[in-house]
Amino acid sequence: MKKLLTLMLALALALTFCCAAAEETSKTLEFPETGLVLTQTELMKALPGMFFESDIGVIDEVHHVAVGTVIYTPMDKASIEKLLEGTQAGNPDEELLAEFGRSAVGIYNFASVGGNNTFDSVKEYILSEEVKNAFIPYELGQDGETRFYLLLTNPEDPAFAEDLEKIPEEQRDAYRAASSDLEGLIANIRFGETEKADPEGLSLAMELPDLDGNRVSTAELFAGHKVTMVNCWATYCGWCLVEMPELQKIAEEYADKGVGVIGICMDAKKENKRMEAKEILKETGVSYPSLAVDQSIDKALGIIGYPTTFFVDETGRVIGEPIIGAKIDTYRPMLDSLLGP
């Protein structure tokens, strides 16, 4: 479905299956970056298939706009679990992935708009011409300077007909009902209450294996640096690979300012994945230290998607907010802020 920012669903699918640390879908869908929580409605529960949240987050920093989407697929739970398992292992089932691509639709979208802006005042900046009439926005309410919106697909827009073609004919009436259930959705949405995981103060000083299997003390890597960027990535995450050359530039540019950069490959638990990770580093020109995940850090960080970048002080304590996604333009301002005058 060609929605928000023209390629919103394509990005959502990429985040869900290329970069997300996905778990079994829940009856509660959380969007911490956008600031909403959706509990599945009765009509959603009656619709065969699976729902996923994709919390895309900030897409326009100037106008303070963050977005999220609920992805629906009529695929059954067993197929989705098999696809997720393969994707997380870096070897997705190609037939199931293709089926997901053919069947997945963005059934609901959300937006949070800060800075005392409104959806009407920012839509020209975030919606392309071809989708400007694809949504019917409903303002859910306001928390401080931020307004929250539910964006239902306009049933008169060609995009809705395209989505409907992906749904099995016998399920289309149920899909229509669920996709337009304004009353049920409003009753089941909370906004401005989302509790984000707060890793600030968490210590990342520990021993981890490098990509050759040798144990490395991260405390030694952090020592002597005012700030260290800890970039958590995965071999199957395309956005992770895209930002790596820029991370290398940052490592070189900020070295004299007391900044270090290390990478942690979060799916390099086995030898074959460590070999793949090493090849990726070679291809992207990365020379900053690169480590592999183990259970201790995997559970401690509670990462919901890749890449995720943490910032730590010289003792290894997390400082500031982690950056979720390949938001390259935000790294230098964050470092400058943490380094201070």
Image (spheres, rainbow, N blue to C red):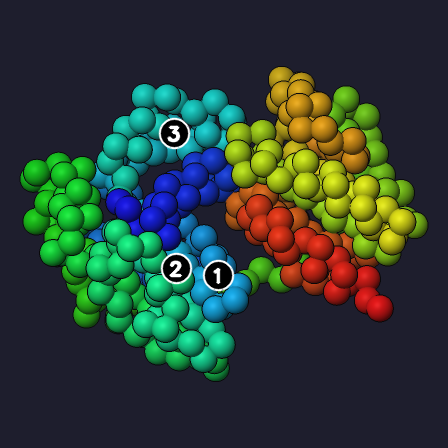
User: Dot 3: within a 10 Å radius of its alpha carbon, few (fewer than 14), some, or many (20 or more) residues?
Assistant: many
Q: Is residue 140 left or right of residue 179?
A: right
- Residue at 42% x, 76% y: name it: 117
Quadrant for residue 149, please give it: bottom left
Q: Position of residue 330 (x, y in %)?
A: 63, 56
- Residue at 70% x, 32% y: name it: 292
Asked if the residue under mark 1 is in contact with the one under mark 3, i.e. CB atoms within 8 Å, the reply is no
The kind of residue tagged 2 is Ile
Q: Quadrant of the C terminus?
A: bottom right
Camera sees residue 170 = yes
Whether residue 167 is situated above or below residue 159 in the rendered picture: above
Query: SS class of the residue under badge 3?
Result: helix
- Residue at 63% x, 21% y: name it: 276
Q: Of the residues under marks 3 and 2, which one precedes in the sequence?
A: 3
Of badges 3 and 1, the one in the foreground is 1
**Disc assigned to residue 221:** none
Asked if the residue under mark 2 is in contact with the one under mark 1, i.e. CB atoms within 8 Å, the reply is yes
The kind of residue tagged 1 is Asp
The kind of residue tagged 3 is Leu
Query: SS class of the residue under badge 2?
Result: helix
Camera sees residue 315 = no
Q: Position of residue 161 (x, y in %)?
A: 13, 46
User: Dot 1: within a 10 Å radius of its alpha carbon, few (fewer than 14), some, or many (20 or more) residues?
Assistant: some
Residue identified by numbered label 3: 83
Q: Position of residue 69 (x, y in %)?
A: 35, 53
**Disc assigned to residue 126:** 2
Whether residue 116 is situated above or below residue 59 in the rendered picture: below
Q: Of the residues under marks 1 and 2, which one precedes in the sequence?
A: 1
Query: SS class of the residue under badge 1?
Result: strand
**Disc assigned to residue 60:** 1
- For marks 1 and 2, give the CA distance: 7 Å
